[in-house]
Amino acid sequence: MTKPIYVLNGPNLNRLGTREPEIYGRTTLAEVEAMCREAVPGQAIEFRQSNREYEIIEWVHEAIDRGAGIVINPAAFTFTSMAIMDALKMFPGPIIELHISNIHRREPIYHKSLMSPVATAVVAGLGTKGYVIAVRALRDLVS
Ligand code: CA2
């Protein structure tokens, strides 16, 4: 059996589609999950969201044990979490860091990602369609 791709989402993304549509669009996270599954038929996907740093670290550990690749939108943890960065560093496969918005066009506090140095690739600014592009790219990288 092929190993799953993990799509991990950080804090507040469970509220996607409900505020700041000019930046993040109107698509909900449940719709993003459906788009991801449709984009890579036959590819197992573990799609998760948490507001807790601990839980995201545990899921990265789970992916280390049984995952083929990781797409991660760490949201605000992008800029604060050495712990998630350390966990990602241990992952042997490809990692795509994903942001719905282009973090580099935004205020300076959004410019310094702690994750980018340990990511294989970064997708930012393509809206929620970036998830589709990221899971397809990851599927190609792992197959
Ligand atoms: O653009 C992205 O995907 C971000 O990772 C989203 C984070 C932000 O801290 C990053 O800098 C960029 C914020 C996510 C906030 O969650 C939302 C919930 C509801 C509606 C919109 C955003």
Image (cartoon, grey):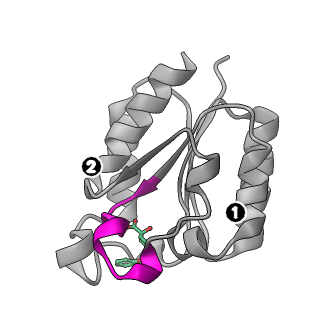
x, y (%) of residue 110?
44, 76
Left or right side of 128 for 12: right
x, y (%) of residue 92?
74, 33
Residue at left offset 26%, top offset 49%:
129
Q: Nearer the viewer, residue 115 or 8?
A: 115
Disc 2 residue type (three-letter): Lys
Q: Tell me the tag on residue 56.
A: 1
Q: Tell me the tag on residue 125.
A: none
Q: Is residue 22 above or below residue 83?
A: below
Residue bearing the label numbered 2: 129
Left or right side of 74 for 87: right
Residue 112 shown in magenta? no
**Secondary element at tag 1:** helix
Residue at left offset 34%, top offset 61%:
100
Q: Nearer the viewer, residue 111 or 11?
A: 111
- State how far apart marks 2 and 1 are (Cα): 22 Å
x, y (%) of residue 27?
26, 64
x, y (%) of residue 101?
31, 65
- Quick one: which residue is furthest to the left in this view? 22
Q: Nearer the viewer, residue 65 or 47?
A: 65
Q: Which quadrant would residue 90 be assigned to in this image? A: top right
Disc 1 residue type (three-letter): Ile
Q: Is residue 82 above or below residue 47?
A: below
Q: Is residue 141 above or below residue 125?
A: above
Residue at left offset 44%, top offset 71%:
111
Q: Counting residues from the N terminus, which is met first, the one under dot 2 or under dot 1? A: 1
What are the residue bounds of the magenta stretch? Answer: 98-110
Tell me the quadrant of ligand 1. Answer: bottom left
Residue at left offset 61%, top offset 35%:
69
Residue 100 shown in magenta? yes
Q: Residues within 10 Å of mark 1 (few under 14, many from 20)?
A: many
Counting the numbered discs, the total is 2
